[in-house]
Image: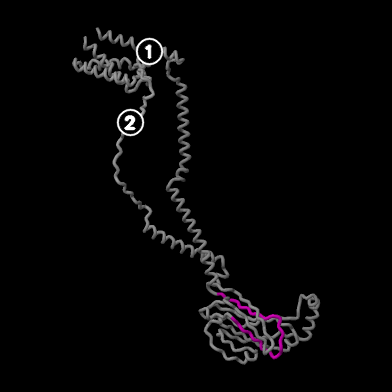
C-alpha cells in the first residue's frame, strides 16, 4: 500500500515539474517545443543533396588538377624540364662543334691575290703573300690574270713567259738556293725559302689584223669616247692544274714569286693570281650541300653527346642512388609525465555561482539540477550515508530495478529532449532508485 502511495507522489511531482516548465517557457515568450514540419525536412534534405552533388562535381572537376600537381607529376615535369634543357644545350654545343669542324676541314674555295710588279733592273717581277688560306691534301687550280693594254710594245712582244714559284713559310726548314739565270736577269737574289712548286707558262695577246682592228675601233668609238670601253685585254693563263700539297703545315705554300720574261718592255694595268679549290669527297658534300650536311653532322654530334650524357647519368645514379635515405637515429627520451592542474590554477567552474539551482524540463523528464562545489560535497556525503543504510539493513535493490523497468516501459512512448544528460543527472537517478528501494524495505 505504501508503495502505491509513493508512486502517486512521484506522478504528482512529475506533473508539477511539467507545469512549472510550461510556465517557464510562457514567461520566456517561447512556446512548447514542437516537431519541425515535414516541408522543412524535405527542403533541408533537398539542400543537403544539392550540396553533396555540387561537392561531388567539384571533386570530379578537380581530379585532373590534383593529378597535374601531384608529386609524381612534379617529378615528371622536373625530369622533362631537365631533359629539354640538356637537349637544347647539347644541340647548341653540337652546332658550335659542327661550325668549328666545317671551318677547319673545308678550306676557302677561291683565293685571289694582287701582285705588284717591280720594273727597272731586269724583267718585271713581284711577290705576294698567301697566308694560311690553303690546305694540305687538297687539289688546287692556279691561274694568272693579266690586264694588258693593246699598246704597240705589247703587240710587238708576241709570246712572253710567266715564271711562277710557290714558296713555304719563312720559318720552315729551307735549302739555300743558287741564283738562277731567270732570277739574275730579273735582278732578284736567290731565295733561301723552300720552293714547293714551280711552273713556267707562255702567254700572248689576241691577234687581230689591221682591218679587223680598225673596224672594231671605229664601231666602238662612241663607247670609247664615253669611257665605257678601253683598248685592253685580260689574259687568264693556267699555271697549275690539280696542285696538291703534302700533309703538314710546313708543306703548304704561303708566299709566291712571279717573273714576266719578254724581249720588249711591256706595260701592265694589273696582275693577279687566282687559286680555286677542286673539292671532292666529303668536302664536296659539305660545301655544295650545306643544309643537308648541317642536319646530318649536327644530329650525329647531338646523338653522341646525349648518349655520353646518359652514360654519365647512369654512372652517377649507380654511385648515388636516389632511393637510399639516411635514417636518423634519435636517442630515447623519457616520456613526459602528465601533470594535473594545481589548486592555484583557475579551474573551469571558477567563475560559476555557488548556489545550487533546479531548472524545469518537459513532462515526464527529470528536472535539471546544478550543484555547486559545496553542494557536490554534500551530495557525495548523502550518497555515502544511504549506502551505509542499505548495507546495514541488507536490502537488495531487485525491487527497485523491477520498478525501473516498469517505469521505463510506461515512458517508452515519450522522446527525450536531450536536456539533462550529464554525469550529475546519472548520479541523481541512482540516488532516486535507492530512495525508491527504502520505503519498500520499511514496509
- The secondary element bearing badge 2 is classed as loop
Q: Which mark is residue 341?
A: 2
- Mark sitting earlier along the chain (2/1): 1
* Quarter-of-image position of residue 354: top left
Residue that sits furthest to the bottom in the current view: 181
- How many other residues sit within 10 Å of disc 2, few (<14), some (14-19) or many (≥20)? few
Q: Which mark is residue 18?
A: 1
- Can residue 368 be seen in this snapshot? no
- 148 drawn magenta: no
Which quadrant of the figure contains the N terminus? top left
- Is 120 drawn above or below residue 44 in the view shown? below
Between 301 and 309, which is closer to the camera in this rendering? 309
Between 392 and 336, which is closer to the camera in this rendering? 336
Residue drawn at x 34%, y 19% as measured from the top left:
371
- Is 77 drawn above or below residue 354 in the view shown? below
**What's the magenta region?**
255-279
Q: What's the CA distance linking mark 2 and mark 1?
A: 41 Å
Residue drawn at x 67%, y 83% as measured from the top left:
117
Where residue 358 sits in the image (x, y, percent)? 36, 16
Q: Is residue 208 left or right of residue 100?
A: right
Where residue 415 sits in the image (x, y, percent)? 36, 18
Between 284 and 227, which is closer to the camera in this rendering? 227
- Can residue 323 be seen in this snapshot? yes
* Quarter-of-image position of residue 122: bottom right
Residue drawn at x 45%, y 48% as measured from the top left:
74
Amino acid at each position: 500500500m505504501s508503495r502505491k502511495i509513493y508512486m502517486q507522489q512521484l506522478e504528482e511531482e512529475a506533473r508539477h515539474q511539467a507545469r512549472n516548465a510550461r510556465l517557464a517557457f510562457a514567461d520566456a515568450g517561447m512556446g512548447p517545443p514542437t516537431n519541425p514540419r515535414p516541408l522543412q525536412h524535405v527542403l533541408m534534405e533537398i539542400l543537403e543533396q544539392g550540396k553533396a552533388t555540387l561537392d561531388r562535381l567539384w571533386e570530379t572537376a578537380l581530379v585532373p588538377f590534383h593529378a597535374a600537381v601531384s608529386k609524381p607529376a612534379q617529378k615528371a615535369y622536373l625530369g622533362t624540364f631537365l631533359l629539354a634543357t640538356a637537349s637544347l644545350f647539347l644541340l647548341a654545343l653540337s652546332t658550335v662543334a659542327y661550325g668549328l669542324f666545317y671551318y677547319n676541314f673545308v678550306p676557302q674555295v677561291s683565293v685571289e691575290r694582287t701582285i705588284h710588279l717591280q720594273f727597272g733592273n731586269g724583267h718585271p717581277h713581284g711577290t705576294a703573300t698567301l697566308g694560311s688560306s690553303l690546305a694540305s691534301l687538297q687539289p688546287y687550280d692556279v691561274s694568272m690574270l693579266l690586264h694588258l693594254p693593246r699598246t704597240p710594245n705589247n703587240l710587238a712582244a708576241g709570246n712572253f713567259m710567266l715564271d711562277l714559284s710557290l714558296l713555304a713559310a719563312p720559318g720552315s726548314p729551307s735549302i739555300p738556293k743558287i741564283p738562277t739565270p731567270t732570277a739574275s736577269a730579273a735582278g732578284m737574289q736567290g731565295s733561301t725559302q723552300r720552293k714547293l712548286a714551280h711552273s713556267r707558262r707562255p702567254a700572248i695577246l689576241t691577234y687581230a689584223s689591221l682591218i679587223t682592228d680598225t673596224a672594231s675601233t671605229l664601231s666602238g668609238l662612241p663607247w670609247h669616247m664615253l669611257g665605257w670601253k678601253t683598248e685592253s685585254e685580260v689574259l687568264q693563263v693556267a699555271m697549275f692544274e690539280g696542285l696538291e700539297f703534302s700533309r703538314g703545315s710546313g708543306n703548304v705554300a704561303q708566299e709566291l714569286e712571279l717573273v714576266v720574261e719578254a724581249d720588249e718592255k711591256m706595260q701592265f694595268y694589273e696582275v693577279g693570281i687566282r687559286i680555286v679549290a677542286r673539292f671532292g669527297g666529303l668536302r664536296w658534300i659539305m660545301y655544295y650541300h650545306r643544309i643537308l650536311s648541317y642536319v646530318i653532322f649536327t644530329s650525329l654530334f647531338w646523338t653522341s653527346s646525349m648518349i655520353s650524357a646518359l652514360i654519365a647519368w647512369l654512372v652517377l645514379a649507380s654511385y648515388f642512388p636516389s632511393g637510399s635515405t639516411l635514417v636518423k637515429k634519435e636517442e630515447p627520451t623519457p616520456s613526459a609525465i602528465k601533470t594535473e592542474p594545481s589548486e592555484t590554477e583557475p579551474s573551469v567552474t571558477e567563475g560559476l555561482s555557488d548556489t545550487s539551482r533546479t531548472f524545469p524540463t518537459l513532462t515526464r523528464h527529470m528536472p535539471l539540477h546544478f550543484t555547486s562545489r559545496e553542494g557536490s560535497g554534500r551530495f557525495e556525503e548523502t550518497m555515502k550515508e544511504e549506502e551505509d543504510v542499505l548495507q546495514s539493513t541488507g536490502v537488495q535493490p531487485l525491487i527497485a530495478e523491477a520498478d525501473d523497468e516498469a517505469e521505463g516501459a510506461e515512458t517508452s512512448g515519450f522522446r527525450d529532449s536531450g536536456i539533462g544528460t550529464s554525469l550529475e543527472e546519472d548520479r541523481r537517478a541512482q540516488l532516486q532508485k535507492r530512495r525508491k528501494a527504502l520505503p519498500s524495505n520499511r514496509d
